[in-house]
Amino acid sequence: MATALAKAAEGSASVEHAARIEHVSKSFAGPAGQQLVLDDITLDVAPGEFVTLLGASGCGKSTLLNLVAGLDRPSTGSITTDGRPALMFQEHALFPWLTAGKNIELALKLRGVAKNERRGRAEELLELVRLKGSYGKRVHELSGGMRQRVALARALAQDSRLLLMDEPFAALDAITRDVLHDELTRIWAETGVSVLFVTHNVREAVRLAQRVVLLSSRPGRVEREWTVDIPQPRRIEDAPVAELSREITEVLRGEIRRHGQH
Amino acid sequence: MASTETTDTTADAPVKDSSGLGGLEAGLDALETSATSRTPFRQTFVNKILPPITAIVVVLVVWQLLVSLKIVDDPSKLPSPADVGGEFKDAWLEGKLLDYIWTSVSRGLLGFLLALAIGTPLGLLVARVKFVRAAIGPVLSGLQSLPSVAWVPPAVIWLGLNNSMMYAVILLGAVPSIANGLVSGIDQVPPLFLRAGRTMGATGLKGAWHIVLPASLPGYLAGLKQGWAFSWRSLMAAEIIASSPDLGIGLGALLENGRNASSMSMVFEAIILILFVGIAIDLLIFSPLERWVLRNRGLLVKS
């Protein structure tokens, strides 16, 4: 872990941003001609920063994440990232033909980690997500929360400076989600990785982030930003979290109402 | 007691906090995962082995009754189970029984391996190259519905009455199944795996090797299974139609010899052997392979 942190620090000395999104627009060919999904998005993620992208359906938050991940290209504008970002999905996306440990090792292998180091590194990462002893478990033998933790370990195995998360806890039950919020906060603090986290859950956004970015829908634009200076560790039921969530929800609802008026 | 005290005093607040979270998480993990165990042999025996044995016994009893009660009173149409058993015994004592089986099985398996070597790259090509798929994809699927017996006459004319003709018929029967199995396996790879692979840097050949091929394995195996069934059927058709003393006596030839000799018990012997070998190869090779792959992926539903 120490070596990974040292490397991240060394790399970030020359780079000011984990991700820099400049005037990005994206349109897709739809039934009614070209449809604008993202409109002139400008957003920076600082090294080590935790940013949540919040928005209702149709705000293009997942599209934006795909663009940052390099899975798709913006129509206009530019995106620069500090190395290739790691991406975590709502579905765990673990490969069922590999064990939990081997899933992590595949990420290490594809990154070029030497064969004799992979096993030890994979065990370390499993320990980081508190799944020591699950190395040989098959994916279907793990619970939903455990799968997402292995997926997180696999994403961390890529040793990226930027971790993109696309509603990774949306499919989990509330109790598990709550625990994974605590875990993610801890791991983020331990590793110093930058996180860009997409969600439609306002409280989750406030619970986790240093900065919440609200996107408007159809097309997605940066509507407003909030800096969250509530100290960690926070709980989702804490009063300041609830208070800020209420404020953001009001703005979000106003934005959604606007779509029903024409 | 003393040791617990020391750990308590050395542990500072944040570590204690996180160990509380760890304990919570361990509890959740324990609640949400259920232990799976292997089914005991007794249960396997009652659920899996007993029913087919019962079915075989019932068939034998009905068969014997048909003969004993003289419902079918013509040994040239329906020989008694004992007659057919005698046929097996004679063949065994003459040392020919295993020869019959080996002649056909060795042909079938060698032909199948050849079909595997041709069908696999062909399937990859059809699945991955658009032009090839558009050009021969439909023909490949269509060939599956063409009975392989249809290939026997042209194969005899082109290659003569020899082993190559047998292999040609097997290949034409099995290659389309194997290739199609791989194609549908690759088509059914969830796009999420491909996206996950791409973000991890598995693109191009690396992506094919680490993601696409292992992900398509269940479809490929289904294709292999069907490919074997087609190989075996094609081979039997070829052996029945193209019998020649130079070719040795396989199971198809045995059947044809029985017909020529008007020996119904020999015909029965051949049919039972053909059925037995087809089932045995599937049970011994393909089913365990398929079950192993599916079980590893959690795709095998326990009944």
Image: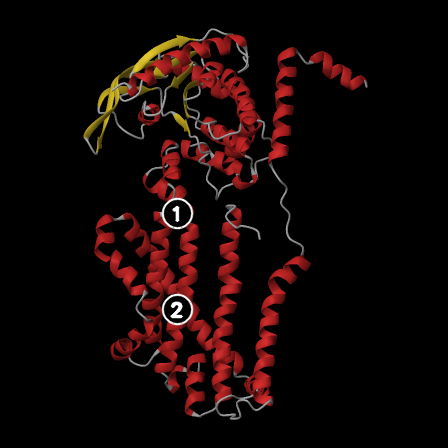
Q: Amino acid at mark 2?
A: Ser
> Label 1 is found on which chain of the structure?
B
Q: Amino acid at mark 1?
A: Leu
Q: Is residue A238 left or right of residue A211?
A: right
> Label 2 is found on which chain of the structure?
B
Q: Quadrant of the N terminus of chain B?
A: top right
Q: Which residue is mark 1?
A: B213
> In the figure, B179 relative to B213: above or below?
below
In the image, farthest residue toward the front: A261
Instruction: Residue A255 in the image: state x and y as whole percent.
Output: 33, 15
Would you identify the image quadrant in which residue B49 lies? bottom right
Residue at point 61%, 75% (across, down): B57
Q: Which residue is mark 2?
A: B231
Residue at point 52%, 89% (across, down): B72
Q: Which label belongs to residue B157?
A: none
Residue at point 34%, 57% (across, down): B180
> In the figure, A186 relative to B186: above or below?
above
Q: Nearer the viewer, residue A247 or B209?
A: A247
Q: Is residue B57 visible?
A: yes
